[in-house]
Image (cartoon, grey):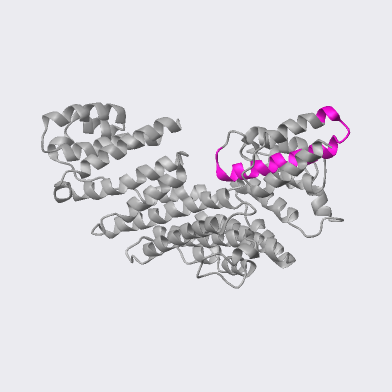
Amino acid sequence: MIRKSQSIFFKILCILFVIPQAARAQEFIKSQGMLYFNQGNYSAAVTEINNWIPAHPGEEAMAKYYMAEAFYNIAMTERQARSARQNFVLAHQYFQEALSYSDLKRKYDKLYYSSQLKTGWCFFRRAETGERPVDLLNVAYNSFRSFDLGAPDSLKLQVHFLAGESRYRAGLISRFDSFWPGTSPEKVNATLSLFRDSEQSYQKVLQISSGSEGVRFITEIRLADVKYELGKIYQSVEESLFRRIQDDAKGPSARETALALFGEIDYPAIIGKYKAGLRSSFGEFMRYDQGTVLLNKYFITFDQNDKQAALDHFSKVSSGIYENELRFREGNADHNTDQIDGNDRFSALVQNDRRSFYFQLLSGPGAAEYLEGYFWLGSVQFIANRSTGIDNLESFIRRSIERTEPRISALLEYAQYWRSVLFLEANRDNRGKLRELKQLLMNFDPRNQELAEEKDLLLKLTQL
């Protein structure tokens, strides 16, 4: 489940990094196309500017810049991903055409730098729609990295941050997409490299002394986020694989490296350095994120002090938007235990009623957003060998089968396998049900090599 502060975070970014409007040539300012543009009627602006260009040689660069901006703004308001992508492609085309005029920088330097910046944004935005996200984030990163360093510091802040953001988001996708049991060291090293690249870009933002307090704040938060993601990687890496990881910053073991990274994160201390306005606006988000860090530390140590420290942070979060997130994390705390038998909290978690934090995700406000609740409830019922897990895992599979996010795809394979195991346990003496299971397994082709081997074994059991 994605930490909610990540979506809130990007809204802050968009507010802080508003691209300034450039000075405009007097004649173009008075055109009907610009009138439509300033009114927000971007489709009409495209038509009018396109008609204006042939009659005004010498001002094509500015006109094409605003054509690009119009297409970009149309894309930002599109509800359909396909239409948004098409308009971002057109926006990129016209930004490139504007940049092709050799006198653009001399005559309209703000338009020149903005065109360069928006070229990267077009790729970044297309990646956000789900179109080849890793590939397009890589193109966006290279575009931001090639930005003219003669630009004002205010723009360099943006490109360094966005280069970091491109790598960070690609790293998230890679972590969810690549970290199966049995994953190769090459995949781990590639994912670590993405996060290390993002770290370097974010550091460049902090090296520019003219950065506003808001920009410095979100950059420090992102650097902590990078440490969190690196910690999650090492938390899941087996020691046999750890030895083949190429990372100069790693410690003696995967466990120690993860704990060291989590130990370096202090979200409340970051926000404590800034003005009261930021503290009051984002203090709860930081407490929640710190609780998540401490909870992951507990998953490694199983030290009850770490668990209690995490729950203490969560208890200080009162914002309604975190209601379901807090249930999810409380469930995580009870789920990750080395003591199942006789554990009343784990016993409550497997119930198909409101005693379970995971069940509460499926029945409370905003339940539609928490389809993972079915997965996690089914997963603890699988551990407890409860046949009720079949229906919950089936509900997750049915709701997720068309989803393309790497995280959901990874969970989906486990859900299909666990559902099959529980189904076999519940129907050992029913030949008809076993034939049904055999067909399901024959159609199940997991990318996870460990699950593929377990599936083959399960398939043989249906034939006994």
Task: List x then y, in percent, for residue 26.
Answer: 13, 39
Seen in the picture, residue 119 relative to 267 is either above or below; the reply is: above
Residue at 75% over, 54% down: 334
Left or right of 456? Residue 200 is left
Residue 409 highlighted magenta (yes or no): yes
Residue at 60% over, 62% down: 234
Q: Quadrant of residue 456?
A: top right
Q: Quadrant of residue 413?
A: top right
Task: List x then y, in percent, for residue 310.
Answer: 66, 61
Type of secondary structure dominating the magenta stretch:
helix
Residue at 60% over, 42% down: 408
Residue at 26% over, 37% down: 94
Q: Is residue 374 visible?
A: no
Task: List x then y, in percent, for residue 168.
Answer: 47, 54
Residue 40 highlighted magenta (yes or no): no
The number of callouts visible is: 0
Q: Is residue 114 visible?
A: yes
Residue, far right: 429
Per the rendered image, the range of residues in magenta is 404-433
Seen in the picture, residue 4 relative to 197 is either above or below; the reply is: above
Task: List x then y, in percent, for residue 221.
Answer: 49, 60
Q: Quadrant of residue 253?
A: bottom right
Quadrant containing the C terminus is top right
Left or right of 20? Residue 179 is right
